[in-house]
Amino acid sequence: MARRALVSGANGFVGAHVARVLLQSGREVRAMARGASDMRALEGVECETVVADLRDPDSIERAVAGCDEVFHVAADYRLWVPDEAPMYAANVDGTRNIIAASLRARVSRIVYTSTVGALGGGGREDSPVSISEMIGPYKRSKFLAERAALDAARAGAPIVIVNPSTPIGPLDYKPTPTGRIVVDFLNRRIPAYIDTGLNLVCVEDVAHGHLLAAERGRIGEKYILGGENLTLKQMLARLGQIAGLPAPKFRAPWIAAYAFALAGEAIARTITHRAPRASLVEVRMARKKMFFDSGKARAELGYTAAPVDEGLARAIKFFREIGAAPAAA
């Protein structure tokens, strides 16, 4: 009999790819999403769907019932929010709710999707870090949620943690902050770059890493699921080569980026009530290059990552197909 896996946030960017990988492995998939969610990322996917909210323990209990494994991918992933409370409720309290329900359902494995943003600056799983280093509510909430997962694992819960870096690829309907960089580039809205860096990885490799974590990961351990370390200038140059567009040549000083974000947030809070093009959190995060090493995942899980240009190409194709960016010239 096939194993049944619950995927929270299965309609999201990473969750939709995790659901596909699990189906390909022979598992039955129960896709969990909130009511009235955008389900386009799951079109054509043969899975059971269940409506539940991370902040509602009873709905989580019903979603987990009868499952053998839980992949907790769902999270409130925004780098600017007018009110932080809902983010902590979803990311921290919601993680505790998922773990508690999973333990009562006696699932054999829980894979918790954290983020490299919750790790230290050394680029490895065991790099020293404290909550004081977490910039913004998203990172702080994910740091606290990861600590809750580690505490549960030490108490006997069958939890393995994965820390994706910066996934890129198709099905990013929202889009994520990284997908927004691609969309803005394709729409010629990035006149300059700042001196920062990130670890880019194809989203399909991140999804496969979740499966490997379930099958080979050690309980209570963390695994970075990353790809290639690139400066923002290098990333934009790669996008330009693939998309056939010129990349920005001007490097903006940090103080100019800070002033731009400060003005954008003022307008967002008082007039538009929508996320600004660049937030103060994003600019503060950009002062440190987010470079990481997936050596532990390669050694223990057999994890591999394809060239990130493949993911960038698929992302460009996807955003053009859905009309988020102009078609190729």
Image: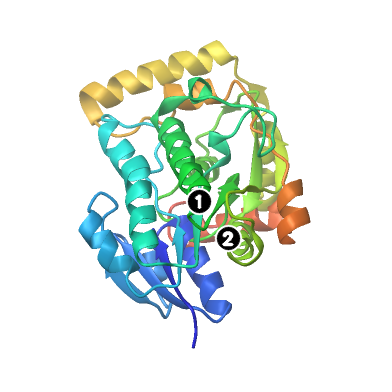
Position of residue 184 relative to residue 70, above or below, is: above
Q: Is residue 307 visible?
A: no
Position of residue 7 relative to residue 168, above or below, is: below
Point out which mark residue 113 bears: 1
* In this picture, residue 61 sits left or right of residue 110: left
Of the pair 98 and 251, the residue shown nearer to us: 98
Q: Residue furthest top?
A: 255
Q: Residue at x 26, y 30 (%)?
A: 83
Q: Position of residue 168 (x, y in %)?
A: 58, 51
Kind of residue at disc 1: Thr
Q: Earlier in the sequence, mark 2 or mark 1?
A: 1
Position of residue 43 relative to residue 151, above or below, is: below
Point out which mark residue 210 bears: 2
- SS category of the residue bearing label 2: helix
Q: Residue furthest bottom?
A: 1
Q: Position of residue 35 (x, y in %)?
A: 22, 61
Q: Residue at x 67, y 36 (%)?
A: 126
Of the pair 259 and 153, the residue shown nearer to us: 153
Q: Give how far apart the Cα atoms at labels 2 and 1 are.
A: 8 Å
Q: How many residues crowd around disc 2 within 10 Å: few (fewer than 14), some, or many (20 or more)?
A: many
Q: Residue at x 63, y 59 (%)?
A: 209
